[in-house]
Image (tube, rainbow, N blue to C red):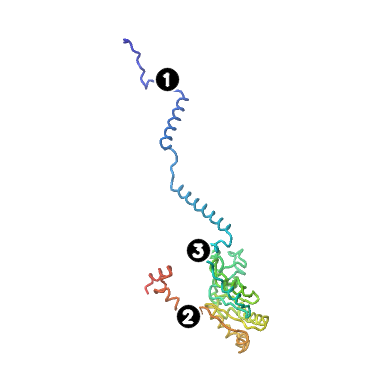
């Protein structure tokens, strides 16, 4: 056993040799690799709520675009194929049944739309309505309601004194069958009836949409737009060009009252009436098929909103529970 031992220098001695830089880097790398192997680097950025929201929104958008692409790429007959595979063959539409039974177009048909179902388009407006010439302010997609709500209200409102459009604004009813075939995308009004009549030979020359501005009074539609005179002329033209076959009138909702006003007006003497004489309706009209005419007003709508009759309508039922009635 040696009698003399070499003394070990203390760790905090300044005279101790400093470790080399390369050795420090290697040791740090080894330590970080060991930490990652154990459970990951704890010094990295943590997953926050913002990251979660962004990830969720990205997933929803991706799924939406994929579904939209698949829907547009889907053949038009695929939904019908799936429906028939589940429920069996669909029955023939009424127009197809009538055509098989030998029915053909004979009497011209006039549609009279009800309140709020007829489209309205802009012909003149203020500066806020630039780019909306002949675009629909009512009916269709209702896009302008969300884009320019104040401008839309300004152009849809009527003058308090005259009862028609304010100065500098002209909103007029859409003409043709497209005026009230669809009230909004997916919400048809006359489209199904028009399609079934077309299957037995009806065309636009034998069908007429008596569109009018539902915002103004019945008489003002004649004063401002000559709507009643145009209905009279179109009925006379269709009867004359269809071998004298009388017209069949199909009014709906407020259109029932509007056409009643027309029948009184057309036989009244001019200038307050149409001057057609007392036998004009009997000469030109075969039948009037009223659909949902409010002959006694609309008390049914009020009772339906505030009674148990609204049990199948969730929103109306909610308001009925809030009502003191």
Q: Say which residue label 1 marks.
A: 17
- Mark 2 — residue? 297
From the image, state whether disc 1 or disc 3 is nearer to you.
3
Give the SS element for disc 1.
Answer: loop
In this rendering, is residue 273 above or below 87? below
Image position of 37 (left or right of 200): left
| Mark 3 surroundings: few (<14), some (14-19) or many (≥20) residues within 10 A | few
Q: CA distance from mark 1 to mark 2?
A: 105 Å
In the image, is residue 137 above or below residue 16? below
Q: Position of residue 105 (x, y in %)?
A: 63, 78
Q: Which residue is mark 3?
A: 86
Q: Look at discs 1 and 2 and give the one toward the viewer.
A: 2
Give the mark, 3 or 2, whose residue is nearer the N terminus: 3
Identify which residue, 183 or 265, lies in the foreground.
Answer: 183
Does residue 167 appear in this view?
no
Query: Is the C-beta separation of discs 3 and 2 under 8 Å?
Result: no
């Amino acid at each position: 056993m040696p009698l003399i031992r070499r003394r070990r220098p203390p760790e905090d001695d300044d005279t101790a040799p400093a470790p080399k830089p390369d050795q420090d880097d290697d040791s740090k790398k080894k330590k970080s690799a060991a930490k990652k192997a154990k459970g990951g680097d704890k010094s990295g950025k943590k997953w926050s709520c913002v990251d979660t929201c962004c990830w969720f929104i990205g997933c929803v958008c991706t799924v939406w675009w994929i579904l939209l692409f698949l829907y547009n790429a889907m053949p038009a007959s695929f939904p019908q194929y799936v429906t028939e595979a589940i429920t069996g063959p669909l029955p023939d539409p009424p127009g197809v049944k009538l055509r098989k039974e030998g029915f053909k177009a004979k009497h011209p048909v006039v549609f009279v739309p009800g309140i709020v179902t007829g489209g309205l388009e802009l012909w003149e407006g203020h500066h806020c309505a630039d780019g909306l010439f002949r675009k629909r302010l009512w009916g269709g997609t209702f896009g302008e309601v969300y884009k320019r709500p104040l401008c839309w209200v300004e152009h849809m409102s009527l003058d308090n004194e005259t009862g028609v459009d304010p100065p500098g604004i002209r909103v007029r009813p859409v003409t043709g069958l497209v005026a009230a075939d669809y009230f909004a995308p997916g919400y048809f009004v006359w489209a199904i009836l028009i399609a079934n009549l077309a299957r037995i030979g009806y065309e636009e020359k034998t069908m007429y949409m008596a569109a009018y501005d539902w915002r103004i009074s019945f008489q003002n539609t004649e004063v401002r737009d000559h709507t009643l005179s145009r209905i009279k002329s179109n009925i006379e033209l269709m009867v004359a060009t269809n071998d004298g076959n009388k017209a069949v009138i199909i009014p709906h909702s407020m259109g029932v009252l509007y056409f009643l006003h027309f029948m009184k007006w057309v036989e009244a003497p001019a200038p307050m009436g149409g001057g057609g004489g007392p036998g004009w309706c009997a000469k030109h009209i075969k039948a009037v098929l009223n659909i949902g005419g409010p002959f006694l007003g609309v008390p049914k709508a009020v009772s339906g909103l505030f009674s148990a009759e609204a049990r199948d309508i969730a929103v109306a039922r909610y308001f009925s529970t809030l009502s003191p009635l």
